[in-house]
């Protein structure tokens, strides 16, 4: 079992980092978390077969987290995929994603494989496979956007996630809105934590690490300009790590 960082960049396009994305790989199931712009090329660069991906999870609908989904499905079609693709997403935006795929001329009867949409209920575990479960909890990352939806036609689900694999609990913050979002799963003992590092100060992440005490904490969603090494206390340098594209961690 392992996690591969497909991309560790922020929403700002970079020549050094792909947009933020993870591949959680366990026996018989590979889950891709987020599919921003350029995801197909990022997977290709790491030698990951498109058709080895069993499921995709979309954390929220900022472009750097979902806009490459149609392109990825296109690549799967062109590589003669036959197996079903699971798409895990909050129920409020299932129709948005379905329409995005449809508007990309990706008609299911021409794909030769099924798209299986699985709604992520809040605060309830959703089964991925026999020993792999996901729990979605709403964070505050998109709260400030609601006032701009003058037509009142949008929903704003944005998730932080607990991935439960056998006895291990992996917490992924996703993009957050405040330090409070770091504690959404404080009722669980964490084996590994993964935090974004663009929308929150490193000192708050360090404080969270000292509270939750996961085995390791990896930082992702990093912009080129950000240099944080001197902000991590010397005693935690081996515990809080900056991720990079292609980094693999064993679970």
Image (cartoon, rainbow, N blue to C red):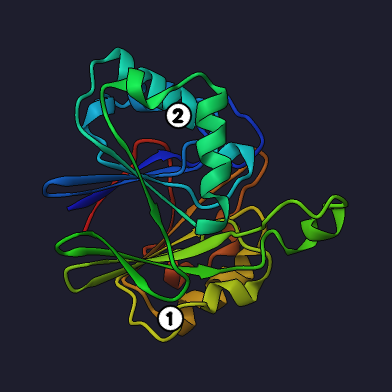
What residue is at 55 percent from the left and 55 percent from the top?
Answer: 229
Q: Residues within 10 Å of mark 1 (few under 14, many from 20)?
A: many
Above or below: residue 109 compared with residue 154: above
Residue 234 place in picture, x, y as percent: 48, 68
- 19 to the left or right of 121: right
Give the left or right position of residue 89, taking residue 190 as reference. right
Residue placed at 67% from the left, 40% from the top?
Answer: 225
Q: Is residue 250 left or right of residue 39?
A: left
Left or right of residue 149, residue 8 in this image:
left
Q: Which residue is mark 1?
A: 212
Name the quadrant containing residue 193.
bottom left
Q: Farthest residue toward the left?
A: 27
From this view, report whether residue 184 is shown above or below residue 154: below
Viewer-side residue, 75 vs 5? 75
Residue 8 on image: x %, y %: 49, 42
Secondary-structure class at tag 1: helix
Residue pictured at 65% horizontal, 46% vertical: 226
Nearer-the-camera pick, 100 or 23: 100
- Residue toward you, 219 or 109: 109
Cα distance, mark 1 to mark 2?
31 Å
Find disc 2 in the rendering and name its residue. 39
Position of the C terminus, as image quadrant, is bottom left
**Any part of residue 65 in sight:** no
Place of residue 49 in the rendered image (x, y in percent of width and height, measured from the top left): 24, 25
Q: Position of residue 99 (x, y in %)?
A: 56, 34
User: Dividing the picture into quarters, in which one does residue 192 lie?
Assistant: bottom left
Q: Nearer the viewer, residue 27 or 84?
A: 84
SS at mark 2 in the image? helix
- The numbered dot on residue 114 is none
Can residue 167 be seen at all in this image of the molecule? Answer: yes
- The crowd level at tag 2 (other Cα within 10 Å; few <14, some 14-19, many 20+) is many
Q: Residue at x 38, y 74 (%)?
A: 124
């Amino acid at each position: 079992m392992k996690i591969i960082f497909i991309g560790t960049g922020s929403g700002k396009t970079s020549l050094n980092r792909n947009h933020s994305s993870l591949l959680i790989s366990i026996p018989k199931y590979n889950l891709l978390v987020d599919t921003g712009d350029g995801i197909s090329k990022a997977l290709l660069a790491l030698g990951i077969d498109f058709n080895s991906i069993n499921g995709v999870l979309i954390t929220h609908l900022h472009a750097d987290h979902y806009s490459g989904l149609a392109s990825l499905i296109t690549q799967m079609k062109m590589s003669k995929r036959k197996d079903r693709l699971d798409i895990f997403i909050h129920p409020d935006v299932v129709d948005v994603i379905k329409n995005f795929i449809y508007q990309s001329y990706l008609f299911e009867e021409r794909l030769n494989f099924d798209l299986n949409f699985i709604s992520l209920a809040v605060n309830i575990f959703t089964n991925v496979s026999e020993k792999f479960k996901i729990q979605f909890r709403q964070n505050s990352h998109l709260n400030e956007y609601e006032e701009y939806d003058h037509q009142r036609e949008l929903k704003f689900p944005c998730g932080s996630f607990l991935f439960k694999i056998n006895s291990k609990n992996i917490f992924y913050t996703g993009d957050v809105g405040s330090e409070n979002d770091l504690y959404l799963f404080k009722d669980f003992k964490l084996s590994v934590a993964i935090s974004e590092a663009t929308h929150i100060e490193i000192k708050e992440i360090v404080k969270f690490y000292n509270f939750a005490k996961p085995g390791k904490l990896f930082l992702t969603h990093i912009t080129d300009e950000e240099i944080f090494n001197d902000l991590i206390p010397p005693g935690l340098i081996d515990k809080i790590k900056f991720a990079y594209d292609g980094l693999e961690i064993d679970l």
